[in-house]
Amino acid sequence: MTTTRPVAPPASEARARVQAVRQRHARRGGRATVRGRAYPAYLVALFTLFYLVPVVHARSTSPAPFSVSSVNFSAGVAPLVCALAVAVCWGGQLAGRFWGPLVVQPFLLHVLMSTDLSPAHYLGTIARRRLAYAGTVTLLAVCSAAYLATDLFDRAGTALPGLAVTAGISAVAAAAWLWGQVRAVRDNFLLAGAVGASALVVAAVSGTAPDGRYGHWLAALVPALLAAAVGPPAFRALPSIDLARLARESARASQARAYAWTGTLHHALDLYRPEPRGFPSALIRTDGSLRGYLAQGAVRALRTPGRAAAAATLLPVGGASLTHGVAGSGGGPEWWWWAAGSVGAYLGSGWVGETWRGLRDELTMAPLFGERWGGLPARALAWPVVAVTAGTFLGGALVALFRWPLPAGRAGSTVLLVAGSVVLVLGARFLREMKLHLPLELLLPVITPFGDLSGLRVVAWQFDGIVVVLTGVALMNAVPSATGSAVLAVCLAAGCVGAGLRRTGWAHRGLLSRLRRG
């Protein structure tokens, strides 16, 4: 009795069949049109003309904000390079879990899955091409950031090591992106731990070497070796990938892409919110009554542990960066620390729980929940306000302890500026979370001598929270008085709250009467 086994097609035949399927699919209308490519190119040209070119010109004619020539490049920059490599690797793994390089159009994936081809045949080419794109984009982004923020590429002695370091980091980012999608959660944790341990070892060795010699080459060699060790096992895992999970990821990505192109980016992000789980009865005490407002918010935050952990990390880090920036002399690099810390606190404020969404739903569905406010603001805002304030001030307190005593006259102003920044962050978060569908008036053309700028209005509406935070920090930095900066932050936050209420349909005219009835 003989058993027949399906004969795998040769590699050349499999490649030809995959190309035929892709060409057939492209002729169905899924291929991008010239007009579809022209609009993104138009936005990129506007960004380059009005932002990138002036910034590059200003950088070429002025000193760099951060100078690496004043420190030993090998010994002083190696810890920073290690920290950047760890952040890029972990970010690539996290991005791969949500939107990896193997995410393709659902129909094309369905057609390829219905054939006798191995997943390695039709997914390998896609992975190699997208990893090359990701590595190139990361390399250009890191080199551009290093050129704009430092004088790394101003001297030949640091330019070549800097280019080698950025190339190694880019290779790690691409390999980690694929690893995060094709490997199990346990393997991702092992890789994250190995990368963190390697970064600590490299930083310690480069610091103990005589005069920091060869530390920069070590910082460049280790990421390259790590990418070489991670890439091949990730590609070898392609034949055993879970195609059902990949199909679900592709379908969700296609829906998110459609939401983003139609102007509802917040709906696209909602597709990637984790489902709450656990603690089914923790909101109720043993006597049947509900727990306090803070306890309710904490329990809801713990039902999404991943988001809660991200918030618990971002808020102290943002608070530390924010305090480090406002405690300085003002201007220059201190402003960048201030802005980065405010953005980090803003991002963390959205991950402390789902109470922001609950508040938006109750405000926008008045016939269902009723018009009486009652304890609605306190119940919905108590936990995010307390969590954001506590987390930010915790990171700020740690920085203040290490930098104590602060410069003369800076202690009181530091507290005022940090408090004003926290109020601004909460106001910007309220404005963002009350966002509904894209207003139709944003699609109207804005005719200028430079063309139609309506696309910039849509982009500003999509990222209005970050725009408000960065603009508010810039205005606060321009005010000479700390008290004036704090008052300005409170006024901006009040404006954000008013704009957020208007988004949900709560007009100013009936607001006070509703509060009194509550």
Image (cartoon, helix red, strand yellow):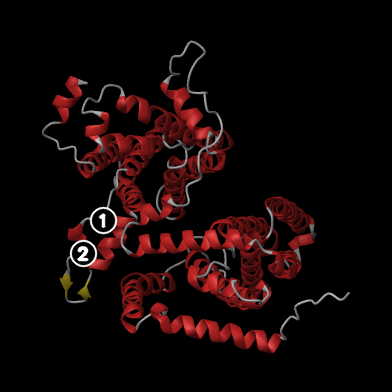
Residue under the image location 49 percent in, 68 percent down: 106
Left or right, 339 with respect to 403, comes to left
> Where is residue 417 drawn, in percent x and y?
38, 38
Foreground: 356 or 122?
122
Going by the numbered disc 1, the residue's amino acid type is Leu
Q: Is residue 7 visible?
A: yes
Q: Which quadrant of the figure contains the N terminus?
A: bottom right
Residue 402 vs residue 304, the one in the foreground:
304
Q: Which mark is residue 465?
A: none
Q: Quadrant of the C terminus?
A: top left
User: In the displayed structure, would residue 401 be above or below residue 475?
Assistant: above
Task: Report which residue position mark 2 lands on.
Answer: 443
- Can residue 405 be seen by looking at this rendering? no
Residue nearest the observer in this picture, 53 or 177: 177
Residue located at (51% from left, 41% from top): 311
320 relative to 49 in the view: left or right: right
Amino acid tagged 2? Leu
